[in-house]
Every structure is written in C-alpha cells, then in structure tokens.
C-alpha cells in the first residue's frame, strides 16, 4: 500500500496521529527497557535464588498493558487491522525485536503526521 493509499485510509487528523505516535514511542521504549529488568529479575530469582526484584513482574505487566493501549490507540487512528496490532504486541515480547519494531512503526507512521 502506498503512502497516499494509507493516508486515504486514515480517518484521524495528523495531529491526533502524531499524539498517538508519541504515546506509542514512549511506551514502546519503556516496555522494551522494562523487559530487560524482567530478564534480570528472572536470572536473579532462578539462577541465584535472589528475590530482590520480585516486585518487578507486576510493574512490568502494568507497563506492558500501557503499551498495549498505546498500540491500539495508534492502530485505530491509522487504520491497522486487529491482527496487525496483535502482531506488534507479540513482537514486543522478544527482547531487542521490540526496539526494531518500534523504529519500523515510527518510519511507517511519521509521513501520516504531515498533511
């Protein structure tokens, strides 16, 4: 689909898309970083029997839920399918891939923020 076709399919105004993209970017980066803290928590817990970060798992879950809301918010504004939004959430569960996907989404959606 060309950029012109995508712009025609988008129902939100460019400012709303820009706001949704900013929310998505921040939440994606925070969720990606939170994933690494979760990995550290798991290594400490299962590798060293240390529960010092046991509190982090629910915090990470909350951060991921915010990311899911940000993904849906942006997705509905730019007319993504539900499958596409789910794919983005699944890719965010893989360390490092979350950051790659965030950059790809930003490159795709940024042209829609300029009328």
Image: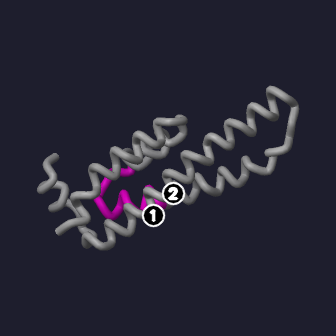
Classed neighbour count for the residue bearing mark 2: other residues with Cα under 10 Å, few (<14), some (14–19), many (≥20): many
Numbered tag placed on residue 27 in the rendering: 2
Is 103 positioned to the left or the right of 60 in the image? left
Tell me the SS state at disc 2: helix
Numbered tag placed on residue 23 in the rendering: 1
State the image coordinates of residue 97 (x, y, percent, origin top left). Answer: 46, 36
Q: In percent of the image, x 21 and y 66: which residue is there?
A: 114
Do the CB atoms of the residues marked 1 and 2 lie less than 8 Å apart?
A: yes
Please give the count of numbered marks on the rendered protein.
Answer: 2
Query: In the image, is residue 101 above or below residue 45?
Result: below
Q: Which residues are magenta?
A: 70-82
Q: Main secondary structure of the magenta part?
A: helix
Numbered tag placed on residue 33 in the rendering: none
- Is 78 a magenta residue? yes
Is 10 positioned to the left or the right of 77 in the image? left
Q: In percent of the image, x 54 and y 46: which residue is there?
A: 32
Classed neighbour count for the residue bearing mark 1: other residues with Cα under 10 Å, few (<14), some (14–19), many (≥20): some
């Amino acid at each position: 689909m060309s950029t012109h076709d995508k712009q025609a399919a988008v129902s939100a105004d460019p400012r709303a898309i820009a706001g949704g993209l900013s929310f998505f970017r921040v939440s994606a980066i925070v969720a990606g970083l939170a994933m690494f803290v979760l990995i550290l928590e798991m290594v400490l817990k299962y590798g060293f029997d240390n529960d010092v970060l046991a509190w982090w798992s629910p915090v990470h879950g909350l951060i991921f839920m915010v990311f899911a809301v940000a993904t849906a918010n942006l997705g509905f504004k730019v007319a993504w399918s539900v499958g596409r939004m789910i794919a983005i959430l699944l890719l965010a569960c893989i360390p490092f891939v979350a950051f790659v996907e965030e950059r790809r989404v930003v490159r795709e959606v940024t042209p829609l923020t300029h009328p």
